Amino acid sequence: MAAAARLVRGATAGMVLCRDRATRPLPGLDGDALLAEGSPVVSIARSCIDDGRVFASFLWPRGGRHAPDGHVRVTVLAAPGEASARLLGTVVLSPVTHLRGLTPRELEVLGLLVDGCSNQQIARALVVAPRTVAAHLEHVLVKLDAPTRTLAAVRAEREGLYVPLVPSPCRA
């Protein structure tokens, strides 16, 4: 697991998720408050693996959701078959290199778009008017060079250019 985590460029912190819901430090990397047991980042990482994903990448705001002090990239790697009896996977933090000019709010809108939310659902979740969501999406489409919201969601998920909302208002 530690060897796989070293593949994440610029990794600064990491942890191992265990099947018994415990977390353990990842050898060779520091800990981080964002990786504390029960944190939203850990909950999202567990959900990614529980959903059957072997790899996920997303952004998380440093300093809190409403006063971000920059973002950190979160990379989730599911445990390989031989290790999966005891281990669920690893979570690694690394610096964000390029946000394509996306604002913190646009990253949140993208997170809800990736989850399949409609404009109305995004507006309710972020407590803004639907027209505000439409304006954010117009900017996102330009910044991601995507002609449709579906392509924007695909690009955001592939590049890990979104901040997920926990819990998602769009997933049952």
Image (tube, rainbow, N blue to C red):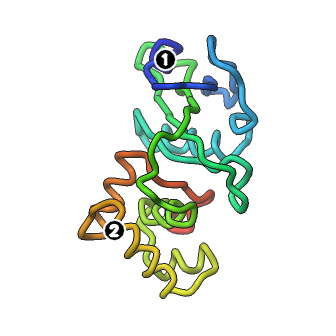
First reached walking from the N terminus: tag 1 or tag 2: 1
Q: Which structural element holds mark 2? A: helix
The answer to whether residue 26 is visible is yes
Residue 21 percent location from the top left of the image: 67, 31
The answer to whether residue 18 is visible is no
Q: Residues within 10 Å of mark 2 (few under 14, many from 20)?
A: some
Residue 141 percent location from the top left of the image: 33, 68
**Residue 88 - label:** none
Farthest residue, direction front: 101
Give yes or no for contact between labels 1 and 2 (Cβ–Cβ under 8 Å): no
**Residue 6 - label:** 1
**Residue 141 - label:** 2
Query: Residue at left 27%, top 62%?
Result: 145
Query: Residue at left 46%, top 74%?
Result: 136
The front one of 85 and 43 is 43
Q: Which structural element holds mark 1? A: loop
The front one of 9 and 154 is 9
Residue 57 percent location from the top left of the image: 46, 41
Residue 60 percent location from the top left of the image: 60, 48
Mark 1–mark 2 Cα distance, whole angstroms, equals 33 Å
Residue 45 in the image: above or below residue 149: above
